[in-house]
Amino acid sequence: MGLVALVVGVAALVWFCRPREEEPVYKGKPLSYWLIREHLKTSEGDIGPREAILAIGTNALPFVVKWMQYEPIPWESRLMEKAPVVEVFYKRRLDLAVAAPDDLRVLGATGSNAIPALRALLQATNSYSAHNAEYCLELIGGPAVPVLMDVVTNHAAYPAVGEWSLMGTMFILGTNSELMIPGLLSCLENGDGDAAMGAAGLLGEIGKQPKRVVPALVRSVESTNRNVRYCAIRSLAAFAGDAREGVPALVKRLEDPDNDMRANVYNALRRIAPEVLGEKVGR
């Protein structure tokens, strides 16, 4: 037991004493200090971290990309049991991994130089790093849209995330999400089953440009792919009254032998044209 503790202690000492790349500094405090403070801040009036991140600018990007590459290792907990002093290091590493995306949240499109490195992380098998990278790309916004589209159309290249990983995240892109609409429409009509399914779902989540999007979704209600049909119907519901041209196609699907599909159609019609179901508008 004593020998193990000694070995662990020496290993920890070597680790802590290793040469480290010097972080950018603002007002005497390193980047890591400002990032963690930005992540933990409880008051919107605390502008110090944001000011620091903007001042450090793109010099932070190599560190941000490095810090977000955290992957828990099974033996870490056992190591901390033997040498609790090491816990400080591992906790800091996790804190930095969690806080790293806040740099891109503040920098936005200014952080676009990080896109190649983030794409490489997105294509890796480390799930934690890949999802962190995807989140950062969404925070960058417009310049990162081609990579995010590739997640949908070339999903096999992103084993740790997949085409569904973007669902529920379009609000992060904000108005930049509309930049994805042309690619998603192309994918809906020309992509394979999984890609078309993902595109159908995302178009409803974006919920913009109904004159372009709704007709494509209506056509997809007749898709031979069950999952594409299902997602297209759900997305039409997101457009509510703007999707009225889809009512005839939806009514036909009320006779679908698939119970889940019929329920999906029913819910969509309640949003789009409740009177078709004999319900009062606005109920």
Image: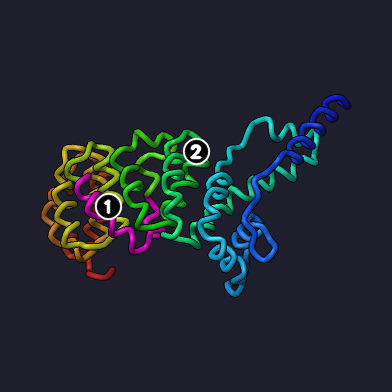
Q: Nearer the viewer, residue 26 or 89?
A: 26
Residue 117 shown left or right of residue 266 in the figure: right
Residue 12 shown left or right of residue 256 in the figure: right
Label located before the other in sequence (1 or 2): 2
For the N terminus, the quadrant is top right
Circle 2 SS class? helix
Q: Nearer the viewer, mark 1 or mark 2?
A: 2
Stretch of the chain drawn in magenta? 167-187
Dot 2: few (<14), some (14–19), or many (≥20) neighbours within 10 Å? Answer: some
Image point (74%, 42%), residue name: 87
- Label 1 close to label 2 by CB (< 8 Å): no
Task: Name the main secondary structure of what is drawn in magenta.
Answer: helix
Q: Nearer the viewer, residue 37 or 54?
A: 54
The kind of residue tagged 1 is Arg
Residue 70 image point, x, y percent = 58, 41
Q: Which residue is mark 2?
A: 127
